Image: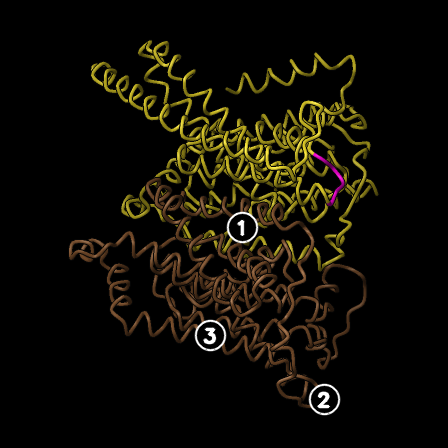
Chain colours: A yellow, B brown
């Protein structure tokens, strides 16, 4: 998994290097930062079972601190090479996580979620009030070309910053992977599954939660530092609730039970955000619908779905699933298209009209006051949905049959 | 003196509005153990629905129809969504209601547009109730107080004095036994969730023209309602009442106080010069940090009394 993650940026980079595609570099940089954010969030959600709603706070504080440190370094009072600045950012995230974690980890589950919600709102409001550190609505900015570097780079070009991001992402991901193998990581898993039992084993579940929260804040701070270095400006929406929600989406959709899940989620969500939001302004509805369907039908995320195929693939029976998959895919596609159609029609009716845009499908303008587009979209949704339901039932029968067949083989192995 | 009286009354009105919202949330939580993040979104839907209905039928029919629609929406969410998410665990329920926030928020924007709606106080209630020190107290606010108090009294009577209420209480503490005795416990849960959402819808109907009806309503009210619920304690209606009145008063009074921390220590002869974070922290007037205070209070109470004022459930 990690080898793929390291190799992929090089493949993309080589393809675009001749043209120096700025869009791809900035999107890949964003993916790197979001990967760190999502992985550090999964330390709480997937590994410790803590649903935190203030994760972006540590990301943002890392960013703000880095900007201030960069300004200090630019003045000459902080002779530190640029490569080590994310570490400083991580330490600021750690400091804040110690303060907030002390309060938040006294509780768990629902109360913990509410405390973190309050903390997140508190920091967002404070960021708008205290102008000296946070710079108010305009944020704070600085210059990353401070002249100190371990390797002699100037970090003026975004490609060099991208290399820095890749390096730090790999280091953080490896560190977090290592943490899952340590006793702390294992006890965090244990307190997620059965917190009473953890007390009998001899560890204080509160300390386990606290340590996990602190370390997760440290890594989030590193991500924030990279954010500050890349964009050179940090505003209050680096610690606001939408970014925390983004972290949650990435970790959950990718899959909270596998380590690589949040990486996949971060890549996917960043791609979707850049791509879909160019085409449609109802991106939030799609993400929300995807999220809710995953909560109900696939709580282990995409990685969970892939992992569920594991026994079938090992048993060599994957070929028998191909036809049922094809039979499910077509009605599924129709249903999704119908849903997208309805959402787009509705959004263009009100929001698009206010913005002066009209719906254009394959080059033809669609009038959203006529009943025909609504009827056809609705028909697709309902008809596709019913057809999908029946195909899904037969798919489930095939799946359960396969699993039942493979069970005795697995227990022998 | 007049400032105190005006702020007192306004704080009371705002506090009762908060109580309507928070009471629905506490009821749902204490009955079903699921924290409904989408509660403030249902409040927003209540306000928007009331606006649309009042365009056609007037305010008073909207007062009755909009909460019923919100209740039906809540029942739908519970039957088709929450029950299925429940199978996957506690966190899954929280995540489900969290995802609902996005969908409801964006759907409201799609259906009604992104601009605030001109949801006005009805003509019948748009007169000053009484005047004191030269300031008017609008009759609409008195109406708000009346509706909130009446609705809450009705809820209390329903829960404590009727047979339905007894079945609900029994399903709360001993769902298997109540079910074995022949009561339809899943239906009870749907009823409670729908009731909580109807309360939020009613709060939206009244609150929508007290505050502006706009797509950002849910994000503005949501965190405060959660603070109130945490402060009052999970599972206690009385604690919720005290907490919401307290929060309402604090936020209303904070806006009129112009003192800062520096003014407190000034009599000791301390002055601060310099332009840094510490000075800013000491000189910021209370009026500007009014929005922060509920969260600070929540953190304080979680440090010293994690169950809230009168909480009965642990988490």
Residue occupying image coordinates x 78% and y 35%: A144
In the rendered view of the protein, which quadrant contains the C terminus of chain B? bottom left
- Label 3: few (<14), some (14–19) or many (≥20) C-alpha neighbours in 10 Å: some
Q: Which mark is residue B134?
A: 2
User: Dot 1 corresponds to which residue?
Assistant: A98
Let me know if marks 2 and 1 both belong to one chain.
no
Chain assignment, label 2? B
Q: Which mark is residue B242?
A: 3
Secondary-structure class at tag 1: helix
Let me know if marks 3 and 2 both belong to one chain.
yes
Residue occupying image coordinates x 34% and y 11%: A320
Give the Cα distance between marks 3 and 2: 30 Å
List x then y, in percent, for residue B64. Answer: 47, 66
In the rendered view of the protein, which quadrant contains the N terminus of chain B? bottom right
List x then y, in percent, for residue A52. Answer: 49, 47
Q: Note whether A266 is above or below B84 in the view shown.
A: above
Q: Nearer the viewer, residue A181 or A254?
A: A254
- Label 2: few (<14), some (14–19) or many (≥20) C-alpha neighbours in 10 Å: few
Chain assignment, label 3? B
């Amino acid at each position: 998994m990690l080898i793929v993650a390291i190799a992929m940026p090089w493949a993309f980079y080589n393809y675009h290097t001749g043209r120096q595609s700025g869009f791809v570099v900035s999107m890949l940089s964003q993916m790197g930062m979001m990967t760190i954010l999502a992985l550090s969030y999964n330390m709480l959600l997937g590994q410790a079972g803590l649903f935190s709603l203030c994760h972006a706070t540590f990301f943002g504080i890392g960013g703000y601190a880095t900007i201030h440190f960069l300004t200090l370094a630019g003045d000459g009072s902080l002779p530190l090479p640029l490569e080590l600045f994310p570490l400083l950012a991580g330490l600021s995230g750690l400091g804040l996580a110690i303060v907030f974690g002390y309060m938040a980890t006294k509780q768990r589950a629902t109360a913990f979620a509410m405390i973190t919600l309050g903390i997140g709102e508190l920091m967002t409001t404070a960021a708008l009030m205290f102008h000296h550190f946070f710079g108010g609505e305009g944020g704070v900015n600085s210059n990353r070309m401070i002249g100190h570097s371990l390797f002699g780079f100037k970090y003026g070009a975004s490609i060099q910053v991208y290399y820095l991001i890749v390096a730090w992402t790999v280091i953080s991901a490896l560190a977090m992977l290592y943490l899952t193998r340590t006793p702390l990581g294992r006890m965090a898993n244990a307190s997620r599954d059965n917190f009473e039992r953890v007390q009998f084993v001899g560890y204080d579940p509160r300390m386990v939660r606290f340590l996990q929260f602190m370390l997760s804040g440290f890594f989030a701070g590193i991500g924030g530092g990279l954010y500050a270095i890349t964009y050179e400006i940090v505003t209050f929406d680096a610690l606001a609730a939408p970014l925390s929600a983004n972290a949650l989406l990435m970790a959950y959709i990718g899959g909270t039970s596998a380590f690589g899940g949040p990486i996949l989620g971060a890549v996917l969500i960043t791609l979707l955000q850049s791509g879909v939001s160019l085409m449609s302004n109802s991106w939030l509805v799609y993400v929300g619908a995807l999220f809710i369907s995953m909560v109900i039908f696939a709580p282990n995320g995409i990685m969970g779905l892939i992992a569920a195929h594991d026994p079938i693939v090992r048993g060599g029976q994957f070929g028998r699933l191909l036809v049922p998959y094809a039979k499910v895919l077509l009605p599924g596609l129709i249903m999704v298209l119908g849903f997208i159609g309805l959402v787009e029609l509705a959004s263009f009716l009100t929001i698009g009209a206010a913005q002066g845009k009209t719906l254009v499908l394959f080059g033809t303008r669609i009038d959203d006051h006529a009943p025909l587009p609504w009827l056809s979209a609705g028909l697709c949704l309902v008809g596709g949905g019913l057809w999908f339901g029946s195909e899904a039932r037969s798919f489930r029968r095939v799946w359960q049959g396969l699993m039942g067949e493979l069970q005795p083989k697995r227990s022998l192995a | 003196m007049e400032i105190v009286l005006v702020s007192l009354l306004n704080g009371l009105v705002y506090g009762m509005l908060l109580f309507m919202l928070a009471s629905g949330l506490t009821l749902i939580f204490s009955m079903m153990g699921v924290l409904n993040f989408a509660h403030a979104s249902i409040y927003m839907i209540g306000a928007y629905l009331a606006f649309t209905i009042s365009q056609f039928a007037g305010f008073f029919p909207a007062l009755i129809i909009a909460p019923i629609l919100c209740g039906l929406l809540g029942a739908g969410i519970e039957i088709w969504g929450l029950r299925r998410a429940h199978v996957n665990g506690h966190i899954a329920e929280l995540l489900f209601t969290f995802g609902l926030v996005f969908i409801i928020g964006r759907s409201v924007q799609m259906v009604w547009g992104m601009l605030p709606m001109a949801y006005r106080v009805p003509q019948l209630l748009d007169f000053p109730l009484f005047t004191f020190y030269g300031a008017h107290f609008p009759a609409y606010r008195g109406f708000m107080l009346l509706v909130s108090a009446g609705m809450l009294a009705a809820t209390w009577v329903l829960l404590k004095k009727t047979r339905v209420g007894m079945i609900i209480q029994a399903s709360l503490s001993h769902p298997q036994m109540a079910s074995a005795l022949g009561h339809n416990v899943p239906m009870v849960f749907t009823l409670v969730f729908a009731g909580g959402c109807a309360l939020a819808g009613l709060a939206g109907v009244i609150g929508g023209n007290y505050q502006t009806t706009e797509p950002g309503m849910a994000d503005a009210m949501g965190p405060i309602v959660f603070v109130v619920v945490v402060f009052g304690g999970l599972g206690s209606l009385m604690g919720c009442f005290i907490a919401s009145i307290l929060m309402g008063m604090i936020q209303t009074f904070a806006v009129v106080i112009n003192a800062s921390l520096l003014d407190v220590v000034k009599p000791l002869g301390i002055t601060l010069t310099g332009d840094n974070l510490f000075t800013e922290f000491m000189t910021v007037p209370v009026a500007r940090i009014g929005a922060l205070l509920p969260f600070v209070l929540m953190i304080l109470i979680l440090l010293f009394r994690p169950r809230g004022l009168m909480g009965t459930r642990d988490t």
